[in-house]
């Protein structure tokens, strides 16, 4: 004889409250994480790109696109 394991109505009501608490905790953690990532990396984003890297990026942008550049190995 198999027995189904499930929640009663009382359990589901408690779970709804837990879900709201988790959601608020998740939102709080997301705000904290966002704030800390900005604190750590905003100064890096404001730094200038090294000249060699900028030149490389410029060369990639200027490179003509040929049909043979498309990867047809699929």
Image (cartoon, grey):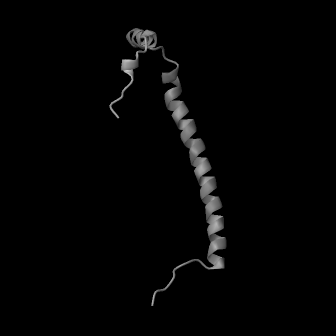
Q: In which quarter of the image is the N terminus?
A: bottom left
Of residues 51 and 57, the one drawn nearer to the viewer in this rendering: 57
Answer with left or right where residue 11 lies relative to residue 59: right
Residue furthest toward the left? Answer: 73
Of residues 19 and 72, the one drawn nearer to the viewer in this rendering: 72
Rendered residue at 49%/86% (across/down): 3
Q: How many labels does the image show?
A: 0
The vertical placement of 71 against 65, above or below, is: below
Answer with left or right where residue 68 lies relative to residue 45: left
Of residues 61 and 27, the one drawn nearer to the viewer in this rendering: 61
Rendered residue at 54%/41% (across/down): 33
Q: In which quarter of the image is the C terminus?
A: top left
The vertical placement of 55 against 21, above or below, is: above
**Residue 31 percent across, percent down from the top left:** 60, 42
The vertical placement of 42 against 2, above or below, is: above
**Residue 12 percent across, percent down from the top left:** 63, 73
Residue furthest toward the bottom? Answer: 1
Rendered residue at 55%/78% (across/down): 6
**Residue 20 percent across, percent down from the top left:** 65, 60
Answer with left or right where residue 62 lies relative to residue 21: left
Quadrant of res 38 = top right
Rendered residue at 65%/66% (across/down): 16
């Amino acid at each position: 004889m198999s027995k189904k394991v499930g929640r009663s109505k009382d359990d589901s009501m408690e779970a709804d409250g837990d879900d709201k608490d988790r959601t608020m905790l998740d939102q709080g953690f997301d705000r904290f994480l966002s704030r800390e990532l900005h604190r750590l990396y905003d100064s890096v984003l404001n730094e200038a790109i090294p000249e060699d890297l900028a030149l490389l990026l410029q060369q990639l942008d200027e490179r003509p696109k040929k049909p043979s550049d498309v990867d047809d190995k699929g």
